Image (tube, rainbow, N blue to C red):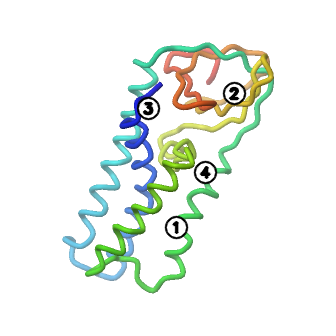
Amino acid sequence: MPNGFAKLLLVATSLSPLLGAVAVNNIALNRPWTSWVPWMGVGIFLIVLCFLLLRYFEEVAQEEKISIVEFERNDKDVLAFLLAYLLPFLSSKSMDFQGQWLTGAYILLIIFLVVSHTGAFHFNPVMALVGYHFYGIRTKDGVSQLLICRGTLKRLNQEVSTVRLAPNIYLTKKNSSNAG
């Protein structure tokens, strides 16, 4: 299972859509490039970081086999999560944090703390952006889990090679031949 620092990094990557929205808003307001490039740069860096972290977990973390007897696709939860933290900015005249860096830092910190405290890092819109899907599954032991995988689950009663990201949250291994 990833250490606490890796989980915090994964949580941080979920903020990249918000940073991108701030950058796009600055572009739309015809602000100079110096006002939007840092936001966009950090957002892109976080997307790349998310992709690299997931690849690292897939390849290096200890493998666990899970037998899936039931599954349901939960990708829609990513959209709800994304809307929940972008919606307040849609009703705002200005979301550029120009001269209000403390307000921006406060909002990002609150989102970061809520996501990390609730363990909701798995509903990370960046994971969906880089091709991962989310499934609510039930194992042969009758335990409900969340499975994150690059491919799509197509059949019941299959065994999948996974990596445990957190209690009840698993990521399929890169070379898992049964998912995808």
Mark 2 vs 1, N-terminal side: 1
Look at mark 1 in the image and give the residue it sits on: 86
- Residue 12 drawn at (x, y percent): 40, 49
Look at mark 2 in the image and give the residue it sits on: 153
Q: Is residue 84 above or below residue 68?
A: below
The extreme bottom residue here reads: 93
Mark 4 vs 2, N-terminal side: 4
Q: Amino acid at mark 4?
A: Val
Which residue is drawn at the image coordinates 64% and 16% (left, top)? Answer: 160
Q: Amino acid at mark 3?
A: Leu
Q: Mark 4 and 1 residues: CB-CB less than 8 Å, in contact?
A: no
Front residue of 42/144: it is: 144
- Residue 167 drawn at (x, y percent): 59, 30
SS label for mark 4: helix
Which residue is drawn at the image coordinates 29% and 55% (left, top)? Answer: 42
Look at mark 4 in the image and give the residue it sits on: 78
The extreme left residue here reads: 34
Q: Nearer the viewer, mark 2 or mark 1?
A: 1
SS label for mark 3: helix
| In this rendering, position of residue 167 left or right of residue 38 | right
| In this rendering, position of residue 31 left or right of residue 159 | left
Distance of label 2 from label 3 (alpha carbons) = 18 Å
Distance of label 4 from label 1 (alpha carbons) = 12 Å
Identify the image quadrant of the C terminus: top right
Look at mark 3 in the image and give the residue it sits on: 54
